[in-house]
Image: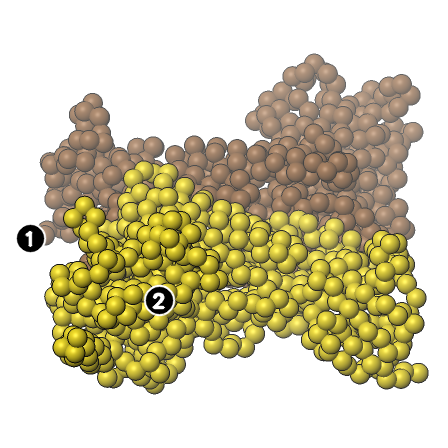
Chain colours: A yellow, B brown
Amino acid sequence: MSTTVTIRFEPEGRKVKVKSGLNIFEIAKKVGVKIRSECGGEGSCGKCRVVVEDQSGLTEVSENELQLIKPKDLGRGYRLACRAMVNDDIVVFVPPESRVGVRKIQVEGMERPVELDPVVKKVHLMLSKPSVDDMEPDFDRLAASLQKRGLNQPEIDHELLRALPDVLRDAEWNITATVWNNKRIISVEKGNTSNVIYGFSVDIGTSKIVGYLVDLTSGDVISIRSLENPQMVFGEDIISRVYYAMSDKEASKRLQEMTIGTINKLITEACQETNINPNKIYEVTVVGNTVMHHLFLGIQLKYLALAPYVPTIKRPIDIKAGSLKIETNPHANVHVLPVIAGFVGADAIADILATGIHETDEMCLLMDIGTNGEVLVGNREDIVACSCAAGPAFEDMHIKHGMKAATGAIEKLKINPDTWEVKYETIDGAKPVGICGSGIIDAVAEMFRCAIIDQDGRFSKNIRTPRLRHVNGKPEFIIAWKHETESDTDITISQKDIQEIQLAKAAMHTGAAILMEKKEVTEKDLDRVYIAGAFGRCLNAESARFIGLIPDVPSQKIAFVGNTAISGAKMALTSKEIRETAQKLSTNVRYVELAAAPSFHNEFLSSMFFPHRDMRKYPTVTKIISSARSQKSRNANQK
Amino acid sequence: MSTTVTIRFEPEGRKVKVKSGLNIFEIAKKVGVKIRSECGGEGSCGKCRVVVEDQSGLTEVSENELQLIKPKDLGRGYRLACRAMVNDDIVVFVPPESRVGVRKIQVEGMERPVELDPVVKKVHLMLSKPSVDDMEPDFDRLAASLQKRGLNQPEIDHELLRALPDVLRDAEWNITATVWNNKRIISVEKGNTSNVIYGFSVDIGTSKIVGYLVDLTSGDVISIRSLENPQMVFGEDIISRVYYAMSDKEASKRLQEMTIGTINKLITEACQETNINPNKIYEVTVVGNTVMHHLFLGIQLKYLALAPYVPTIKRPIDIKAGSLKIETNPHANVHVLPVIAGFVGADAIADILATGIHETDEMCLLMDIGTNGEVLVGNREDIVACSCAAGPAFEDMHIKHGMKAATGAIEKLKINPDTWEVKYETIDGAKPVGICGSGIIDAVAEMFRCAIIDQDGRFSKNIRTPRLRHVNGKPEFIIAWKHETESDTDITISQKDIQEIQLAKAAMHTGAAILMEKKEVTEKDLDRVYIAGAFGRCLNAESARFIGLIPDVPSQKIAFVGNTAISGAKMALTSKEIRETAQKLSTNVRYVELAAAPSFHNEFLSSMFFPHRDMRKYPTVTKIISSARSQKSRNANQK
């Protein structure tokens, strides 16, 4: 006879009333408390350990628990959640080692919700045992059972087929099959492991490779890892890598191996962090710009680098992890998202997927700011895209005192237009070490606002302050005096730093301008501006607009969406439909070759100015500057 | 201005009238004279050499011919058929090295005509060259071009994709793609090679492995090769090999490697014989009994060998040649035909395909006689099947003077019932060396007809002739005296030889009897009896019926169909539809486990008799014997 009992889960304090006789693992599942398990509640993996101090409400310690829990831990109240049945009210403490997906996830990119429908699915099957009256072959038996679950004519990898007879008998015909794309059996495991299914998404950025480990039963990201792209040693920008890859026959193979090596490191780290067996990762999605895409697949770059810049393939590709030496389950499928054109890759497709600009009536501009930036303009009717060789300036490189967004990085600053004094904020409030991306944009914007530099980026000759000094005849502006800094060095912005920013922002702006020209829209017609890229997250919108990196639109129209490339990759991991959309986008998005646009050269030169040679394009900035300038002259007159 | 010219091809003497200006290669194609070519008439392979003595009707020797034909041969009238244009009447001699498929083919098995529709097809494509106005990626360009030819969404092997950019440019966008099953590109070649497409069919018999090299442009078999199955060293019968395979972990792998090694030898030999590049073989079909099937695929035999004798898979399998180390084009597909049950394999399916018993209303019995024999009974409505462990006696093994059907083998014989003198025929009329399968059946049948042996196979005690002698107390009958033989040894049939034949024929007959019982038909209901197996080809039907190997049906109902297993494999190579039929058959044909039939034991013992314990089943034989016996007693009385 079952009664109602109350269970409280700690440390969340979540309470639930259920009928007695269920085990803790089942109850936890019902209320969304996630407890690790590899055997799916069969009492064999020993991963679902929980602590119950007063065990009077629980059934006796079982045989499996005696085997899987050390006597010392049993004494401290440890039980296996899947073996301990609840008969009376209890308090369950879920220790950190048994928790899944509860750590606070650092969201790295905007993402639209998608219905969870991954391409890999697990199906628990209890097969009938063969007998003289039922001599169905092993595979056909498995296939028939899957057919009842709606899977017609599944295929199987040859190696799995060879192992199948032993696996089925060892499992006593109680198995879980992992099926890819409703057509290919990629794993057969003993018992019910249907709640142990993971996927991994990768964004191969020019500078960084980011990986998400995703629980495919929930769609939750349970680990985020990133590492520097190891190809960096062959050049920070993409063109130097292309040249390196073309330099000798083995080079592109070497770059491929390095890239895959780093992806494997991300997988290992993510799995170690969450205590998950990499063998339980059954699907991988990969995005990257077209060069990264080709390098990842080991495809030569020669024809991508030479006119007319034709990629080898643009449609999506599915390859076995084992054949790429990706260290997940060897039968896992690696899905490489499609690219758009020679220099607009799967990352741009991911940007679209994550922001949904292909589904809205609003006219959108998307700028994915990075070493190899992309710009997209359009909406549900039509999208145009281009790539912009911005270089790594926004990612703190080629900037004398540039640094990553780490402790001690100046991330925000203001300059007093009267005294030229600088007020800055550093990450973690530490003594300054250098300037990170957002700090550099702020610095340049402020220097321009305060007329320390002119519209063409040159240092003003009229400023008199100890902060503006000349070293070897070259001007630089001191952001932080050496006595303030951790490194005991003045942190400065030089003329060269300004130029790097000018080149980078001009590249991005030119892309946006030419695409808007193609679409016959102006800044006024834009309903929404998305700023993507890891860098975009901490960017000060006003500063970015001030220097002309982004167009002059009201702040409420601007959204900083972070690393949407990885978000798109994750969406394609959790949703089959998203993959189909991606494929359509790769065909439908129109690529624009900037260099071929008649206005390119002129627009680029105009975009080098702060915010632009044609100030009419930046009415807000114009207004601020003229009011600042007049205020200043008023102040000067009063003195 | 074109006129009409007459060309005669030698040595066939085939004449044709065509308009002038065509080259010899094109003309030959029109009239069905097959000339070898690998480049498809591009003038680059140099394989289409022909001899034209009076060259006044031809265009001048071209650049390509100067490069590809030695000056000496040019002097003798050699030309490249694809380069020499015909302007006036000529006589063309096609030398042996340039001929395709004209050698007299030894047809090895009955085969039904099928419409030529192989699963691999070649498509010649002239792709447009990329330009700034047409930046379609390489693969997508190829796919779009194939789509126009009705191939939607083709896939491509990763390795081919990597090579694609160079291949396309090297070929100047004039290429031939090989497409598997309308969905996968397995090769991309320079120029038009659409008439260079071959396939290979393999029958893995327990004793012999047979291979057919097939020209897939015509469906013609252009080379037949066979080799002993190298697994023979681990036992002549299938059960010893199963035990060996189970003996240690590596054994089945070793057997797989040996089998594939032999198949590779067959491929090499066939290609050398016909001067064809193995890389031009794009598809392989394989049949074999279930044990051979599993060994070929490297699947363990443990569960096939233990009750309830369940195979690992029965449905058809497609694997890349490269992954099996089959030395054709590495991207070729290997199609392994489906099996029916534990001991009835793809060879039985091939038997059905080749004879068409699944499409007729006639009630058919098919006996595939071999070491591991199969029997099938049925028609379009329903077919039942079983396997019979006949052992290798019919294949000349376990027989003291048994030998292969080679020069000097006694293949036919008659015994005079009065004098016991033997009249035999040997292969090539040579001095006898031993007895081949058909000779053994003849010998046993004749010995029984002449009452040298009794119905139960024992030597008669009433015969007085020097030909019947005892060695170490054991009787034997001398077929050929030592002075007649090549080996200077008496060629004899011993009691043990008789027993081997009894066991083998009883196994086959029991299978037929039990299946007929299942189908509720008798000998009278049989409309057709097919005798298959390489051995069956030279069998004397009357002798086979006389000893009770085959049922007592009129000779006109019996057809010897040879090695139908390889015929079926070849049909599946040339016809996609046949593969679909094979798959249906593997599910629909009902397997009967002989040992489980209640009448098995009794039937087997009865079948050990000549022709059977129940003489009513053999009215024709009974009649011959009684007339022979009464004739003999009349003769004796007259003496």
Toward the viewer: B211 or A281? A281
Q: Is residue A637 above or below residue B479?
A: below
Residue under the point 76% across and 29% down? B399
- In this view, the residue in front, B292 or B274, is B292
Q: Nearer the viewer, mark 2 or mark 1?
A: 2
Which mark identifies residue B1? 1
Give the answer, above or below, for where A170 lies relative to A460: above
Compared with A576, B29 (above or below) is above
- Where residue A428 appears, as percent x and y from the top left, is 48, 62
For residue B18, side relative to residue B214 (left or right): left
Element type at mark 2:
strand
Task: Answer with left or right where residue B513 lies relative to residue A242.
Answer: right
Q: Which residue is mark 2?
A: A423
Q: Residues within 10 Å of mark 2 (few under 14, many from 20)?
A: few
Residue A347 against residue B82 in the figure, above or below: below
Residue B458 can be seen in this image: yes
Residue A533 location (% of width, % of height)? 38, 65
Chain letter for the residue marked with disc 1 in the picture: B
Q: Chain of mark 2?
A: A
> Which residue corresponds to the image point at 18% horizontal and 45% vertical from the top-left?
A472
Q: Amino acid at mark 2?
A: Lys
